[in-house]
Image (spheres, rainbow, N blue to C red):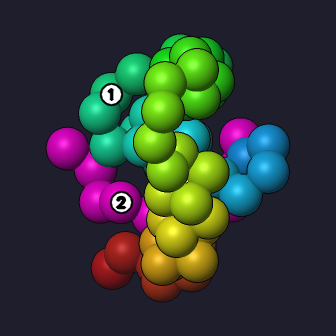
Amino acid sequence: MAALARPRDGRMIGGVCAALAQRFGTSATTMRVIFLASCLLPGPQFLLYLALWLLLPSEKHSSATAW
């Protein structure tokens, strides 16, 4: 499993669904559909999305050269 970080590429709004998709090995579109479907259920989905947006670090690009 990949580390949980918001990717620089493939973001739509905050990159939370893209980060979760990378973590669980699925596509970002699938994760977005799951999130939208979960919004039909009662619960704090939007608050959780906002919290993850604030708490997850942005992915860092490595500029180090392998020797």
The amino acid sitting under disc 2 is Leu
The residue wearing badge 1 is 25
The image position of residue 53, as x and y in percent, is 59, 67
Identify which residue is drawn at 49% across, 58% down.
48
Magenta stretch secondary structure, dominant: loop
Residue at x 33%, y 27% (from the top left corner): 25
* Residue 47 visible somewhere in the drawing: yes
Q: From what the image shows, is residue 56 above or below residue 1?
A: below
- Residue sitting at the far front: 42
Residue on which the image places disc 2: 4
In the image, residue 55 sits, relative to residue 41, either above or below, namely below
Q: Residue at x 73, y 47 (%)?
A: 11
Whole-percent x, y for residue 1 in the image: 20, 44
Q: Nearer the viewer, residue 4 or 61?
A: 4
**Quarter occupied by the C terminus:** bottom left
Instruction: Give left or right: position of 1 versus 6.
Output: left
Residue 59 percent location from the top left of the image: 54, 69
Question: What's the magenta region?
Answer: 1-10
Q: Secondary structure at mark 1?
A: loop
Amino acid type assigned to the residue bearing label 1 in the image: Gly
